[in-house]
Amino acid sequence: MKLSVKHNIFTIFSGLFLLVMILGINSCSTEAPFGPENNHTETVTTQENNASFNYLTWNSSSRDGVRSLNKTHSASAYIRRSKGGQLEIEARDKGSDVALYASFVVSRNSIDHSKAISMSIDDEVVEFEFGPSGTTFEPFAKLNFKITGVDLSKVDLSGIGFYYLRPDGGKEAVSNDGIIVDVESGTIVVRNAQICHFSRYALGKD
């Protein structure tokens, strides 16, 4: 009788251990939800859904105030998970001294797997779009950028910030190490903006 009880207890504990192991394996599989086998997509809103957001314009050749959604300045690179990597863009406004330089740094082991990533800058406003959509970083990646030669004499710079533009049209401030504005030289610098996931980001204010 004692042997039978011990056998039953052993059977119960064995079954529980097996169940825990199965659940553990399944939970580990959720750590990389954006692999090539998962066709994750994110709906990106158009400009109208962010109509209340005042974008900072860096390109003086704006066409009658109509914003272009074409990202004409872009860069891409294959980032290895074990090494990290960096993307850089230097864009210039034709016919002026205005320039925008951006650097995006991914630290080692911050993405779930090695992949090709891209960064694009809007050709008129200070808006960045990254891909592939859904990519996350832990710890966060860092975006640094500098704009020079912009006429800021008539721009209201009070409350300017760097924001994540949500798909539903909302906005969230992005943590950074500082936004430096020099009106006299027409320079704006954003230091170490913390990018935790890929989507759209912009410099401006509500």
Image (tube, rainbow, N blue to C red):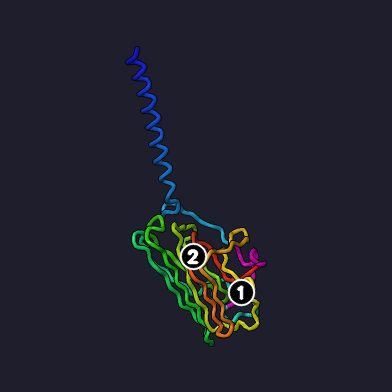
Q: Is residue 55 magenta?
A: yes
- Left or right of 60, for residue 99: left
Residues tagged 2 and 1 counted as in contact (Cβ below 8 A): no
- Left or right of 179, for residue 37: left
Q: Residues within 10 Å of mark 2 (few under 14, many from 20)?
A: many
For badge 2, the amino acid type reads Phe
Q: Residue furthest top?
A: 1
Q: Is residue 23 magenta?
A: no
Image coords of residue 42 (percent x, y): 53, 57
- Report the residue at 56% width, 83% height from top: 186
- Given residues 176 and 118, the one toward you in this image is 176
In the displayed structure, 56 sits above or below 114; it is below
**Residue 67 shows which numbered tag?**
1
Can residue 199 be seen? yes
- Report the residue at 62% width, 58% height from top: 168
Stretch of the chain drawn in magenta? 45-57
Helix, strand or loop under label 1: loop
For badge 1, the amino acid type reads Arg
Can residue 70 be seen? no
Residue designated by label 2: 130
- Left or right of 166, for residue 24: left
Image coords of residue 180 (percent x, y): 54, 75
In the displayed structure, 32 sits above or below 145; it is above
Which comes sooner in the sequence, label 2 or label 1? Answer: 1
